[in-house]
Image (spheres, helix red, strand yellow):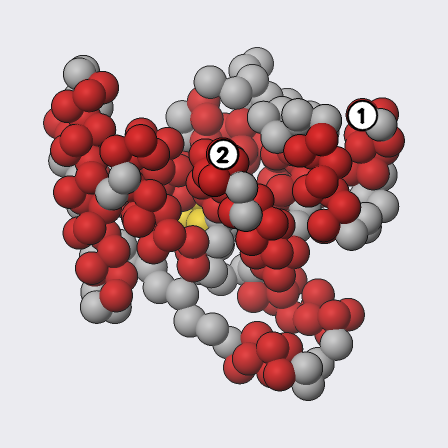
Amino acid sequence: ALNWLHIDVLSDNQTNVDVMAEQFIAQNHLQSTLFDIYVVSLNEMQVTQFINLLSADELLTECVIHTMALSGYVKFIPFIAQYLQQPCFALKAHNALRLLLGDKLDAIIPLSVQFQSDPAEQMTDLTYYGAKILNGWQQQSSLLGLSYIKSADESELEKGNINEAENKSLQEERDINFNRVLNGSALQEENIDTVLSLGSQWHRYVAMLYKHQFTSDSHTQHAHALEVC
């Protein structure tokens, strides 16, 4: 079964998202490079469906946070901010926001809090900033320099006025704007090399996943780029 899971992901067999979620859970393979490769291959509709399936099990909350961050979609920031307010998930949510926003996060959460040496104290302090981020988002503040606006095309999809093939083309067009980010920059091909050169080890790892997704280039530009830190 695990071999078939690898084949489905690496061969891009377009297997039903529900089935893939069941297989990753059944094979206890949610914390793997294969899972990360699968997540970055999903479009917005698919990754939202995938997250909804994982969210049904409270034991998979950390995986949900990880998936939201890995997908790059800005619309998940307020959900991650909600998790940041929960002490048991604060550290995981902070890492997720750091992956998405990079240095932009420093304008909201002081470095002294983000890199507090005492994990328990850091966890407590981070919960306050979760509320701050969420409030800024709800007030449509320029606090993050980012916003998520549902396009007219997405609204039409929900009404059933366009089909999935048309939506796939629309998603590709939308992905070039700031609806997706990595390390505080638009998640698009021309920014990937910058992240590979200047990002943290974790940012480089994710950048390599997307470089392969965008270009089918499997070359590793950094010795540790494919090692999760």
Q: Quadrant of the N terminus?
A: top right
Q: Are marks 2 and 1 in contact (CB under 8 Å)?
A: no
Q: Residues within 10 Å of mark 2 (few under 14, many from 20)?
A: few
- Mark identifier at residue 84: none
13 vs 217, left or right, is right
- Quadrant assignment, res 35: top right
Rendered residue at 57%/75% (across/down): 154
Please tell me how crowded label 1 is: few (under 14), some (14-19), or many (20+) other residues with Cα within 10 Å: few
Instruction: Tell me, yes or no, if residue 148 can be seen here.
Output: yes
Residue at x 40%, y 65% (from the top left corner) = 148
Which residue corresponds to mark 1?
A: 2
Count numbered badges in the picture.
2
129 displayed left or right of 44: left
Q: Earlier in the sequence, mark 2 or mark 1?
A: 1
Q: Which residue is mark 2?
A: 59
Q: Of residues 223 and 126, which is closer to you in this image?
A: 126
User: Could you give the CA–CA distance between mark 2 and mark 1, rounded to whole angstroms?
Assistant: 22 Å
Q: Amino acid at mark 1?
A: Leu
Position of residue 92 measured from the top left corner of the image (x, y, whole percent): 37, 32
> Which residue lies at the image location 45% right of the left edge and 50% below the top edge?
181
Which residue appears at 71% of the width and 65% of the height? Answer: 168
Q: Quick check: 213 above or below 177? A: above
Rendered position, 89 above or below 128: above
* 19 sits left or right of 105 in the view: right
Query: Viewed as shown, does residue 21 lie left or right of 71?
Result: right
